[in-house]
Amino acid sequence: MSVEVLLQEAKESIEAAQNYRSELQQRLHGLNQARKQVRGSSGQSREALRRHFAELQAAATHLLSERLSALLSEVDAIEADSIRPLDDCQSLIEHGVGQADELLREAGEAALRCGLGEKEDKLGSFTKKAMHIQLDSLPEVPALVDVPCVSAQLDDSLLGLLRERVSRHGSVASHPPVQIEELQERPGSILVRWCKVDEDFAAADYRLQYRRAGNGGSQYEDAYIGRDCDFLVLHLDAHTDYLFRVCARGEGRTEWSPWSIPQTGYTTLAPHEWCPGSEGYILSSRKNIALRNDSFQSSCPVLYSNAPTYFCGLTLTFKITAAGQPDRRDSLGVSVHGGAGVGKRSLQRDQAVCISTNGAVFVNGKEMTNQLPAISLGSAVTFDMEVVGVFPVNNNNVSEGGGGGGFKLRVTIGSGNREVVFDWLLEQAVDGLFFGCAFVYSGWKVLVF
């Protein structure tokens, strides 16, 4: 075997060993991350359990102390109300005893010791005092059955109920019942999808939260609560990491499940923005909401996007947040061209597809036979496009009249619970498309995302 062959084999072995070591190091890193997750989540769970049960103990002690104080107050009140008439009766009896003692001491004894001459006067005075005291009148003392005999009724079943509830309070799970499945970037937003990983868990609602990643990130905030398993989180800065997590609430339960493992996502796509400074429209601070602010019936100015930020494979949504008077010249759609001087008075033209507020669909300026529901307050109009390929133009294509070949897009426009699907031929491939809106009357407000 030649030296060159041996050297080649040695190089291959070295390269294989380096790749092997690199793969093992990556697996060690993954193993360390897994161990860190187990240790960290276990420590957090211990702390959460201790804190929760300490709060329960303090709250239970406080409640029991309050109840004990209330019951003792009831005993004190009953005792005070019951003793008061007994004290009054005792005072009356003691007063009578005192009078009797005084009569016996001062009147009776004196009458017995006096001489015969004075005896008649003393006995008369004694008799008068005795009659005044009413020796035959005795106060009534209540029988024991007529006075309160305070007792405490304590139901031992409370301890049993507490024991039964406490034994079922709280749980420990090795995995949350729901996990984030996919993060898809969108212009200025991220589409989050999640799924159940515990098939025995019957979810009634889901809760999605997000925050900026990093040490300086903000606190988690709610993005969505509902029954859907996906949600588009809007108003995100491009090229910025965000953390997402989701949990679920079981059927008939009030508490939320443990959070899923946080997932990091970001978008590289610039957010959809309307072009500022366009005639007849006022924009929001983020430039994603446009308001038609004047009403020239002879004019239907078109407001385009700031750049061609719509790409095939994504969903473009127009959300009507305020509605004005409709007109057949109104339009929402996409266009190959945009900006100043390009179809400023209509979207119902060549190289554009759109829908009017009356539901009519226009392709390259021609109205289609199929029609969608009319657009009104709360309506959401969606545009989805995918590249079909390059095909020769013929009479069966929607945009007929050209010669040679064309770049074909499969377009789906949805409004309400209906949609229309058609092929749109372009003269050449484009990287992105402009979106636009046009309204004759004021009052229309459109959010794009």
Image (spheres, helix red, strand yellow):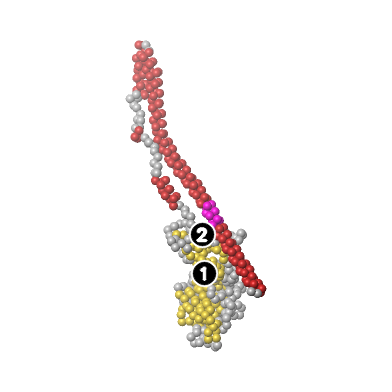
Q: Residue at x 54, y 69 (%)?
A: 184
Q: Which mark is residue 173?
A: none
Give the answer, above or below, for where 147 lies relative to 239: above
Q: Nearer the viewer, residue 340 or 317?
A: 317
Residue 449: where, in percent of width, then height?
Answer: 54, 71
Q: Is residue 416 above or below residue 83?
A: below
Q: CA distance from mark 1 to mark 2?
A: 33 Å
For residue 110, what is the image quadrant? top left
Farthest residue toward the top? 116
Q: Magenta span has 61?
A: no
Q: Is residue 186 left or right of residue 202?
A: right
Residue in the picture at 44% in, 63% down? 199
Residue extending furthest toward the front: 1
Q: Which residue is mark 1?
A: 321
**Is the residue marked by circle 1 packed among few (<14), some (14-19), or many (20+) residues within 10 Å?**
some
The magenta-colored residue range is 37-48
Quadrant where the N terminus lies? Answer: bottom right
Task: Label 2, secondary structure: give it.
Answer: loop
Q: Is residue 177 above or below residue 374?
A: above
State the image quarter where residue 302 is shown. bottom right
From the image, give the main secondary structure of the stretch colored magenta: helix
Residue 414 at least partly seen? yes
Which residue occupies 48% across, 81% down? 368
Tag of residue 259: 2
Q: Amino acid at mark 1?
A: Thr
- The residue positioned farthest toward the bottom in the image shown: 403
Task: Work out whether 425 lies above or below 110.
Answer: below
Q: Is residue 362 visible?
A: no
* Amino acid type, residue under disc 2 in the picture: Trp
